[in-house]
Amino acid sequence: MTLTPDFLDGNAAAGDLEALFGTDMTTASGRCRGCSEQMVLAQTHAYLDGPGMVLRCPGCDSVLLRLVRSPTEIWLDAGGLDYLKIPTPA
């Protein structure tokens, strides 16, 4: 029996992140605060089935970023990242 993961790759979060930041965030890079792994957001593990979106580190499974939308607000927590480097649009 083959098990399927309960997450998608970070590309699944592209639409919500682009709506917030105004640019393609799949190529943005960061470093995990938990294990120091560096990655682009497309490589993260995206969990989209909850009330918001959670991106986890592919190395140690730590929460990197959480985003929740309400009708009037967007909540963003990127506390699991040491930094987030966003490429400048051409």
Image (cartoon, rainbow, N blue to C red):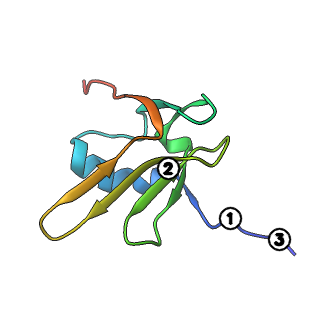
Q: Residues within 10 Å of mark 1 (few under 14, many from 20)?
A: few
Q: Amino acid at mark 1?
A: Pro
- Identify which residue is drawn at 25% across, 27% down: 89
In this rendering, would 45 be left or right of 88? right
Residue highlighted by disc 2: 10
Q: Tag 3 or tag 2, which sits nearer the N-term?
A: 3
- Quadrant of image for the N terminus: bottom right
Residue highlighted by disc 1: 5
Residue highlighted by disc 3: 2
Q: Amino acid at mark 2?
A: Gly
Q: Tag 1 or tag 2, which sits nearer the N-term?
A: 1
- Identify which residue is drawn at 46% across, 35% down: 81
In this rendering, would 21 be left or right of 37? left
The CA span between labels 2 and 3 is: 22 Å
Residue 31 percent coordinates (x, y): 52, 29
Q: Amino acid at mark 3?
A: Thr
* Residue sitting nearer the eye, 51 or 42: 51
In this rendering, would 13 be left or right of 74? right
- Identify which residue is drawn at 51% across, 56% down: 46
Task: Find numbered disc 2 in the image and state the secondary structure of the residue it sits on.
Answer: helix
Say which mark, if any, is on residue 43.
none
* Residue sitting nearer the eye, 80 or 86: 80
Q: Is residue 88 above or below residue 10?
A: above
Residue 70 percent coordinates (x, y): 21, 68
Most extreme residue toward the left is: 72
